[in-house]
Image: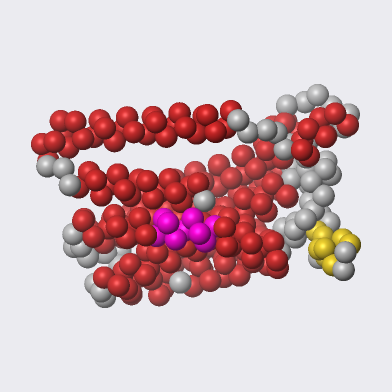
């Protein structure tokens, strides 16, 4: 939800910047935008300084006798497979998130000739809707399971690019807004919400944070970080055709689907276990007690 609300703040700043004259923007407006980001960073630092460690971590720190090795060394030794599954799972999600939020905004201006003032309000609505979808999607994964819900989302996102681009090309403002908002709701925070529970639950308690960080951040770099540039290159190489970009979006989401499919269900897994998740460790609360589920 924080990422979505951050995107909403960015959209608000974009709207405000467009009200400035070109001279004002060049003289002082851009400086105000960058200084405002420092305020957000300070707030984030204050919030983090007030957060406690998780009870699970505190309990394990006192009770478990572990070899004093750096967590990254532990991940490399014991958790490489899980890191690769996390990387693959986040690869498609990150790629779609960046393409819907960044590339498609550029596509609307450079290819379809939409005026730039139309885009920021749509991004703002999409970001606010995404904050809600992260919460709702997480609740759904609490009910039916992380893995099965993520597989459903991956399957949906694998086919929707071939619907999204024709809708964008209609030039209809309502259709365009619907596509961008859909991207925020499903491709950005809808799939990320459950992943932020699924990924930590995949790792053992000894190196949970290190494992999630390595898998997620590398997935973000090779996926989302390069996605807008690669998609723009595909557009140029194929004479402005959107089809190669849609195929690219489908292929990366297939990678996420397969990576999620080969991962075990983790819902309500005991987070005190020091080893990575294995099939049969997920649990469901039924009739006043915990039962294991696949």
Percent coordinates x, y for residue 14 in the rendering: 27, 47
| 130 inside magenta stretch | yes
Give the residues drawn in magenta, as a range. Answer: 126-134
The answer to whether residue 97 is visible is yes
User: Residue shown at 26%/32% (left/top)?
Assistant: 32
Magenta: main secondary structure equals helix
The figure's colour scheme reads secondary structure
Percent coordinates x, y for residue 243 in the rendering: 37, 69
Percent coordinates x, y for residue 2 in the rendering: 50, 46
User: Residue shown at 52%/51% (left/top)?
Assistant: 1
**Left or right placement of residue 76 versus residue 242 in this view:** right
| 244 inside magenta stretch | no
The answer to whether residue 255 is visible is no
Work out whether residue 204 or residue 27 is closer to the camera in this orientation and state it: 27
User: Residue shown at 82%/63% (left/top)?
Assistant: 285
**Residue 31 image-quadrant placement:** top left
């Amino acid at each position: 939800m924080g990422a979505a609300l951050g995107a909403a703040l960015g959209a608000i700043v974009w709207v405000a910047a467009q009200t400035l004259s070109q001279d004002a923007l060049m003289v002082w407006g851009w400086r105000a935008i960058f200084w405002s980001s420092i305020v957000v960073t300070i707030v984030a630092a204050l919030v983090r300084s007030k957060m406690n460690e998780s009870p699970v971590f505190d309990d394990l720190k006192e009770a478990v006798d572990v070899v004093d090795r750096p967590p990254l060394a532990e991940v490399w030794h014991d958790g490489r497979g899980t890191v690769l599954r996390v990387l693959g799972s986040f690869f498609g999600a990150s790629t779609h998130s960046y393409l819907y939020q960044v590339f498609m905004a550029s596509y609307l201006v450079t290819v379809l000739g939409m005026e730039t003032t139309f885009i920021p309000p749509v991004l703002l609505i999409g970001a606010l809707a995404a904050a809600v979808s992260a919460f709702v999607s997480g609740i759904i994964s609490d009910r039916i399971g992380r893995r099965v819900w993520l597989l459903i989302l991956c399957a949906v996102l694998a086919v929707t690019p071939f619907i999204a681009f024709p809708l964008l090309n209609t030039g209809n403002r309502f259709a365009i807004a619907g596509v961008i908002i859909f991207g925020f709701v499903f491709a950005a925070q809808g799939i990320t919400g459950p992943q932020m529970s699924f990924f930590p639950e995949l790792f053992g308690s000894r190196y949970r944070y290190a494992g999630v960080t390595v898998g997620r951040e590398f997935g973000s770099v090779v996926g989302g970080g390069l996605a807008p540039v690669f998609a723009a290159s595909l557009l140029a190489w194929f004479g402005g055709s959107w089809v190669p970009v849609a195929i690219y979006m489908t292929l990366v989401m297939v990678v996420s689907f397969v990576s999620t499919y080969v991962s075990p269900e983790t819902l309500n897994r005991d987070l005190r276990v020091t080893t990575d998740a294995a099939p049969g460790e997920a649990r469901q609360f039924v009739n006043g007690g915990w039962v294991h589920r696949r």
